[in-house]
Image (cartoon, rainbow, N blue to C red):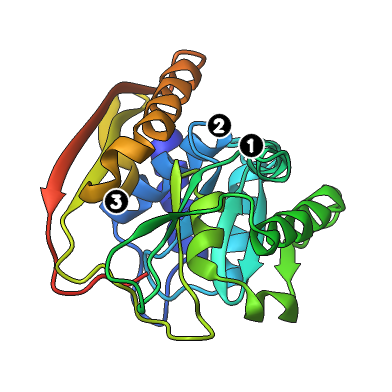
Amino acid sequence: MDTREIFVAAARKCLSAGRKSVSVPQSLDIAAQLSAVDFALKPSLLYDTNSASVEQVHQYLRLCQSSQLVSESLVTLDLNGSSLIVNPLVVCSILERVLQNGGPAVIDVSHSLEKPTIADPVTGRLKSIAQDLLFLLGGFDAADDKGVYVAERSDEWNLSAVFGLLLGYPITYWFNQTESFDNCLSMTPLMVTTAHATWQAGSTRDKCCLYSFSIPAVLQNETQSYLEDWKLGLQERFQQQNVLKDLDVCQSAVTLPSVCL
């Protein structure tokens, strides 16, 4: 079998939910995303294709690794029931920047606010989360046949902010979840940034979306430097590999009646 067929077979063997198998297009999209994580084009893949369990996602990764489709360095992360496949080196670099007063811009979208606002990017809470994740990923034994499990401590984490960190976005949303899990983004003009590429597997290319995130239009000027640095870093990493090609980063404006984080 060629590379595409092996990826499809691995997905169908490990990721089927109930009686429904993962489709060929879905299998190839997962494979492209996984390859992007392996080549450090994105730090993590959040698995949301179907209701496959964290254990199934872990089995899929291990099968891809044993088939030498991706490197042994990737690990699965069980975050409060959400499944991620993580490049620890890239994620730890992001988390270390947070601890060093860097990292992404943090936008407070708490429900009580009239409009989104830039929050202090080095809040004690965000630093504490980064420190916990660094401890978990840094202490992971690659020889262990289990993924990384985030225990009950994540119950108090703002998962919107955590996912922003783990997925490598230049901005991450934060809200006061002790007050409400709603946000102030309803009918707020947003600029959505997407990054697409084509995945080369054998003689065939498949287009995939590597990133998709939004920034409130009212904060475009304040976050422009973060966006430009992110785009430049992505372009530099893109040039260091030859499996994914034709990088295309674009923006579009949307306004939605509700935004779920």
- Are the residues at dot 2 and dot 1 in contact (C-beta closer than 8 Å)? yes
Q: Residues within 10 Å of mark 1 (few under 14, many from 20)?
A: some
Alpha carbons under labels 2 and 1: distance apart: 7 Å
Residue displayed at 67% across by 41% down: 101
User: As drawn, is 119 to the left or to the right of 75?
Assistant: left
Which residue was labeled with disc 3? 214
Under circle 3, the secondary element is strand
Q: Position of residue 224 (x, y in %)?
A: 34, 32
Q: Residue tagged by mark 2?
A: 40
Q: Earlier in the sequence, mark 2 or mark 3?
A: 2
Tell me if residue 144 can be seen.
Answer: yes
Q: Amino acid at mark 2?
A: Ala
Q: Which residue is mark 1?
A: 90
Q: Quadrant of the N terminus?
A: top left
Which tag, 1 or 3, sits closer to the chain's start?
Answer: 1
Picture coordinates of residue 8, whole percent (x, y): 40, 50
